[in-house]
Image (cartoon, rainbow, N blue to C red):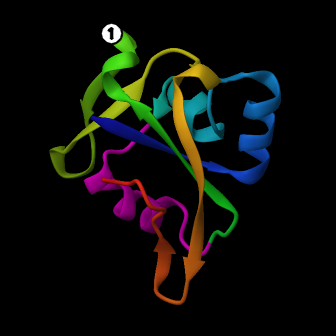
Amino acid sequence: MQVFKILRRPEWEAFHEDGKTTGAPVDLKDGFIHFSTAGQLADTLALHFSGEDGLLILAAAAETLGDALRWDPSRGGDLFPHLYRELSLKDVLWARPCSLGPGGHILPKGVS
């Protein structure tokens, strides 16, 4: 199963340069890296990134993240994947741009 992380372009550039990240400001504040499932991604974009362009969607295989990936209740009791360690570039299967269209964000191919 793939899980997805949304990053702004400067966050991605810093991650790509360093080879690791502890996440975006919200991740640092909460003490874990927020991920979404494919089914949660559109709502996460709408709630937390509304109107933002220049985003990237990163995919990771949940099973390779090990015990540091936990499923915690969040919006409406839905379980969300949270990573309780740094994310390494080697954890990332792919990173693709997420365009902003007239009706909101357009998910990249490969989100399923």
Indicate whether 5 appears above or below 32. below
Using residue 2 as the reference point, say whether residue 107 is left or right of it: right
Residue 108, position as x, y percentages in the image: 48, 62
> In the image, what residue occupies the spot 56% across and 33% down?
27
Residue 99, position as x, y percentages in the image: 59, 71
**Residue at image mark 1:** 67
Using residue 36 as the reference point, say whether residue 11 is left or right of it: right
Residue density around tag 1, few if under 14, some if 14–19, many if 20 or more, within 10 Å? few
Disc 1 residue type (three-letter): Asp
Residue 50 magenta-drawn? Answer: yes
Q: Residue furthest left?
A: 77
> In the image, what residue occupies the spot 55% across and 83% down?
101
Using residue 33 as the reference point, say whether residue 54 is left or right of it: right
Of 19 and 23, nearer the camera is 19
Q: Which residues are magenta?
A: 35-51
Which of the 4 image quarters holds residue 39? Answer: bottom left
